[in-house]
Image (spheres, helix red, strand yellow):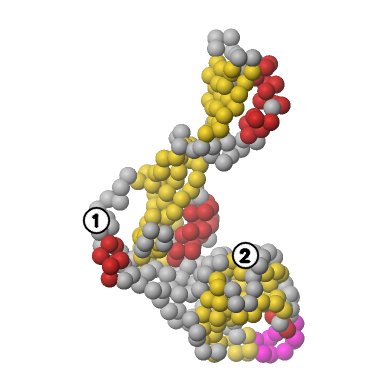
Amino acid sequence: MQVDDPSASEYLRRNQAAASFRQLATGKFVQAETNADGNLLALRYLDNNGNQIFIEKRVGDFKTSIHPPLLEQRLLMRTGEISSTLFAATDAIGLPESTANQLAEIFGSNIDFHRDLRKGDKFSVVYEMDYNNGEPVRTGRIRAAEFVNQGKSYRVVYFKTDNSHGDYYTPDGKSIRKAFLRSPLEFSRISSGFSLSRFHPVLNTLRAHKGVDYAAALGTKVKVTADGTVSFVGKQGGYGNVVIVEHQSRHTTVYGHLSRFASGLRRGQRVGQGDIIGFVGMTGLATGPHLHYEFMVNAQHRDPLRAALPDAAPLDNTQKLAFKKLPQPDRPLGRVARY
């Protein structure tokens, strides 16, 4: 920036107050104010946490001041098409990783991203992005989204049911979520399905496989698929490290072969859908890292990939009246930047 000022260079290289300047990530913008001789008068930038940093020349020295972000929230819209995986499609259009994860979580009860995706499936998403001085600093919540899977369209909009809680609902006010997620892992491949007679690779014998195995990297996060209460956490025979969760008095889910449990997880603890309860491992009777997942109804095993899942609670009458006041699909959602 054609700044030729040894005192400024020394301050920026050595002074602890200017440490954030030396830690700036690639792509960050810096503004410099100089005099005609190239001496630095002021330096402005956003640090890696989004704070505004002002370094100004005072009498005989430089001073650094930190100001909280002056955030402007914008709505952005991006559209993508599946050619292989969801993450490949979101990466191709520059969708932030946190937004891609939200998208998978929102539609995860209706679309099995392990088995249901097809080439040519499409999605659109409207999401919040906070800007500071024209620079994006923080990704927010998805406001609305559509996913077309095998020709069927799923559409949602975010709606706050009270001052502190909100969720995603279809245009007619029904919850998009099921009471259970289809999968306890965000993305992986199914290495072994539900079967009443399967050759066990460790025991070398035919036996029932009353769950689904998801091959995944060691340490992959495992999510509980529904609200519930932990009934067991510990070691149990061939399951190795296992977590068992009871739901709605008649449903049970099992998560086996874990490498370790979520910190502080204990019997009797309440967990919410999507909470991390453990990490993929290969403890117990396992030949490689994977998650063994079971789904039971009234103590009877069901195929997790095909079982009918109960719906989440719908809006009550008062909430429905407020929901109907939201912008309708034929009216603009507001100022949305399209990409």
Q: Which mark is residue 330?
A: 1
Q: CA distance from mark 2 to mark 1?
A: 40 Å
Q: Is residue 168 magenta?
A: no
Q: Nearer the viewer, residue 99 or 119?
A: 99
Q: Nearer the viewer, residue 200 or 63?
A: 63
Q: Is residue 203 magenta?
A: yes
Question: Going 47% across and 67% down the picture, which residue do you hit?
Answer: 108
Residue 183 seen in this snapshot: no
Q: Nearer the viewer, residue 129 or 20?
A: 20
Question: Going 39% across and 52% down the picture, which residue do you hit?
Answer: 126
Residue behind mark 2? 221
Q: Is residue 98 above or below residue 207?
A: above
- Mark 1 is surrounded, within 10 Å at the Cα level, by few (under 14), some (14 to 19) or many (20 or more) other residues, namely few
Residue 248: where, in percent of width, then height? 48, 81
Quarter location, residue 59: top right
Secondary structure under tag 1 reads loop
Question: Going 31% across and 71% down the picture, which residue do you hit?
Answer: 316
Question: Going 59% across and 17% down the picture, which residue do you hit?
Answer: 58
Secondary structure under tag 2 reads strand
Q: Are marks 2 and 1 in contact (CB under 8 Å)?
A: no
- Segment colored magenta: 198-207
What is the residue that sits farthest to the top in this orientation? 37
Q: Is residue 178 above or below residue 139?
A: below
Q: Earlier in the sequence, mark 2 or mark 1?
A: 2
Q: Amino acid at mark 2?
A: Lys
Quarter location, residue 122: bottom left
> Which quadrant, please, contains the N terminus?
top right
> Which quadrant, please, contains the C terminus?
top left
The overriding secondary structure of the stretch rendered in magenta is strand
